Image: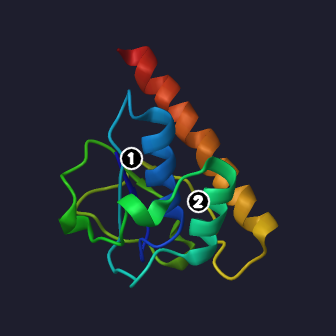
Amino acid sequence: MAFVCVHNSCRSQVAEALGKHLAADVFESYSAGTETKSQINQDAVRLMKEIYGIDMEETQYSKLITDIPKPDVSISMGCNVGCPYVGRSFDDNWGLEDPTGKSDEEFIIVIKEIEKRILQLKSELDNKN
């Protein structure tokens, strides 16, 4: 399962962390982008630590599509900042607004939406097996 956005610094990183945290027994989670940033969004890092006790900087870093294993499923976080191309069509586009530079409340809305969708994916895939 690959969660993809352009910079691989915020939404896709949150999805990777929550996928590993909530659904590791059902699928492997990776995040990637078509560009990288020098660090993960610090607001996302802080809020993920506060809400879930997850330190994304311990186990994650910004990476390109070519840096991860070829995924069975690719999910776009949202193409509002330009849709990356990963060599094939996305299986789903979650259409999430990038919360970078916005309030903690707006960040938390996006994080909780990602959590909800990860749990839905886990349930769907678990029911297929």
Residue 66, placed above or below residue 93? below
Image coords of residue 35 (percent x, y): 34, 80
Residue 9, placed above or below residue 76? below
Disc 1 target residue: 91
Q: Is 111 on the left or on the right of 60, as rendered?
A: right
> Regarding mark 1 in the picture, which secondary structure is present there?
loop
Quarter where residue 44 is shown: bottom right
Residue at 74 percent of width and 57 percent of height: 109
Q: Is 49 on the left or on the right of 107, as rendered?
A: left
> Regarding mark 2 in the picture, which secondary structure is present there?
loop
Quarter where residue 106 is shown: bottom right
Image quarter where the C terminus lies is top left
The reply to whether residue 98 is visible in this rendering is: no
In terms of depth relative to the viewer, which is nearer, 115 or 125? 115
Q: Dot 1: few (<14), some (14–19), or many (≥20) neighbours within 10 Å? A: few
Q: Is 33 on the left or on the right of 96, as rendered?
A: left
The reply to whether residue 72 is visible in this rendering is: yes
Q: Dot 2: few (<14), some (14–19), or many (≥20) neighbours within 10 Å? A: few
Image coords of residue 95 (percent x, y): 58, 59
| Type of amino acid under label 2 | Gly
Image coords of residue 27 (percent x, y): 35, 34
Q: Is 108 on the left or on the right of 3, as rendered?
A: right
Residue 95 badge: 2
| Type of amino acid under label 1 | Asp
Residue at 45 percent of width and 34 percent of height: 23
Quarter where residue 72 is shown: top left
Image coords of residue 28 (percent x, y): 32, 40
In terms of depth relative to the viewer, which is nearer, 21 or 94? 21
Residue at 52 percent of width and 69 percent of height: 10
Residue 30, placed above or below residue 129? below
